Image (spheres, rainbow, N blue to C red):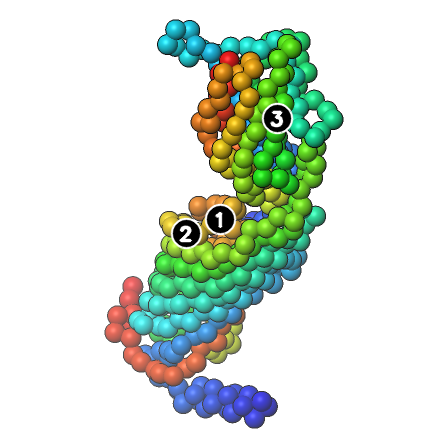
């Protein structure tokens, strides 16, 4: 394991040295991000864990196709029920950088907007359902069996990203998610749809705070950005 | 602060102020010629078989009733009495849990599949909405 890590870091260092730029060149390569915003769930919603990774790539100086992949697990234990849900999501789309660098080419700060198509496949179930009954007596032991759900939505994205060290980035983004299709719900709205948010809402707003590393695999001279006013 | 402002709040820990008891809603009806009209019942009592308390005990006129059913059974027998006449209404159903909210938990809805009844002061009973839940819509029409 140590050897693998050492080789990986060496490879990354070599790639970074290889990609020595002249003034009119930019470096690009797949940029891998991990969302740290889900750590706030430890305080706000401790029954929910979310893991989200993203990969984007600088297609042109302003255009960044991106794919997000994530997994969510929810467990809620109450006196009146136990609820569990787990599943994956993916979002695919692109971000467009709005910053005008003038004649600075080797700059990677971004203020961007973008769009995503989102899809989630997950399951949910409820057990130990109890319902008070004053007249006939209480009910306990009910359940809603595990069943799969699919949700589709689109997201509008806005955010900022800065290169804090060479090839290392930090940034935040806000997603406005609009759900347009859901199937499979039986007896209950999902507590939270992976990648989308609160299950009873058609429109949600979610927040992302990501650390990113760009694997510098290529240098190129942008055709459209240099000299842009 | 920004993060606090935009991050979706969690749910499930709030206070529940909503009832989670699904009930059957029924109205009393009669006929004026060929026209259906609402009617009232005097000196009316209602109870569930096997219980020792009354759901209704009214000297005044009653035009509609709401009653819960046994969540631990597949049928409930209701005993209706008007003046000195007594009828029995047996309702068959499936108990289906439905989430009210993550704060309140679940209700048990009743998906009614059939009913039978005696005919002392009741003429007939029509099942017009099969699912009894938390809404106030009428499930049964009891014709006198």
The residue that appears at 68% across and 16% down in the rendered structure is B57
In the picture, residue B49 is in which quadrant? top right
Query: Percent position (x, y) of residue A171?
Result: 50, 65
| Residue B134 relative to residue A148: left or right | right
- Give the answer, above or below, for where A67 lies relative to B142: below
The residue that appears at 50% across and 19% down in the rendered structure is B142
Query: Is circle 1 on the same chain as circle 3?
Result: no
Look at the numbered disc 1 and give the secondary structure of its residue: loop
Q: Nearer the viewer, residue A188 or B140?
A: B140
Query: Label 2 neighbourhood size at 10 Å, few (<14), some (14-19), many (20+)?
Result: few
- Give the answer, above or below, for where A55 lies relative to A50: below
Look at the numbered disc 3 and give the secondary structure of its residue: strand
Query: Percent position (x, y) of residue B119?
Result: 54, 18
Callout in the foreground (1, 2): 1
Callout in the foreground (1, 3): 3
Please give the residue where the numbered disc 1 appears in the rendered image. Answer: A186
Please give the residue where the numbered disc 3 appears in the rendered image. Answer: B78
In the picture, residue B78 is in which quadrant? top right
Mark carried by residue A154: none
Please give the residue where the numbered disc 2 appears in the rendered image. Answer: A183
Q: Nearer the viewer, residue B75 or A49?
A: B75
Image quarter (top left, top right, bottom left or bottom right) of the C terminus of chain A = bottom left
Chain on which label 3 sits: B
Query: Percent position (x, y) of residue A3?
Result: 56, 93
Callout in the foreground (3, 2): 3
Cα separation between marks 1 and 2 = 9 Å
| Residue A151 relative to residue B42: left or right | left
Work out which residue is located at the far left of the displayed protein and give it.
Answer: A223
Q: Nearer the viewer, residue B8 or A152?
A: A152
The residue that appears at 63% across and 35% down in the rendered structure is B70
């Amino acid at each position: 394991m140590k050897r693998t890590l050492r080789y990986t870091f060496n490879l990354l260092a070599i790639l970074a040295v290889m990609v020595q730029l002249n003034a009119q060149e930019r470096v690009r390569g797949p940029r891998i991000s991990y969302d740290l915003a889900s750590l706030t769930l430890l305080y706000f919603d401790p029954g929910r864990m979310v893991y989200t990774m993203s990969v984007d790539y600088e297609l042109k100086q302003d255009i960044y196709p991106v794919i997000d992949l994530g997994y969510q697990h929810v467990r809620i234990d109450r006196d009146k029920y136990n609820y569990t849900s787990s599943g994956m999501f993916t979002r695919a789309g692109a971000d467009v950088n709005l910053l005008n660098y003038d004649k600075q080419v080797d700059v990677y700060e971004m203020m961007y907007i973008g769009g995503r198509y989102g899809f989630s496949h997950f399951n949910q179930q409820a057990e130990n359902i109890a319902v008070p009954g004053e007249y006939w007596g209480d009910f306990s032991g009910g359940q809603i069996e595990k069943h799969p759900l699919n949700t589709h939505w689109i997201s509008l994205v806005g955010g900022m990203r800065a290169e804090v060290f060479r090839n290392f980035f930090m940034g935040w983004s806000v997603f406005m998610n609009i759900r347009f299709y859901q199937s499979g719900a039986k007896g209950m709205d999902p507590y939270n749809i992976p990648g989308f948010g609160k299950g009873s809402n058609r429109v949600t707003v979610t927040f992302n705070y990501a650390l990113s590393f760009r694997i510098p695999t290529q240098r190129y001279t942008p055709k459209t950005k240099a000299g842009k006013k | 602060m920004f993060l606090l402002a935009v991050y979706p709040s969690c749910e499930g820990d709030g206070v529940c102020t909503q009832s989670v008891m699904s009930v059957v809603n029924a109205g009393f009806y009669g006929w004026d010629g060929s026209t259906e009209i609402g009617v009232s019942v005097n000196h009316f009592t209602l109870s569930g078989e096997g219980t020792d308390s009354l759901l209704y005990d009214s000297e005044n006129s009653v035009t509609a009733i709401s009653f819960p059913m046994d969540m631990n059974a597949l049928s409930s027998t209701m005993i209706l009495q008007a003046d000195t006449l007594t009828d029995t209404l047996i309702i068959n159903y499936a108990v289906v849990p439905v989430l009210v909210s993550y704060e309140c938990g679940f209700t048990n809805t009743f998906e009614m599949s059939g009913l039978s009844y005696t005919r002392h002061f009741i003429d007939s009973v029509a099942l017009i909405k099969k699912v009894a839940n938390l809404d106030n819509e009428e499930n049964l029409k009891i014709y006198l």
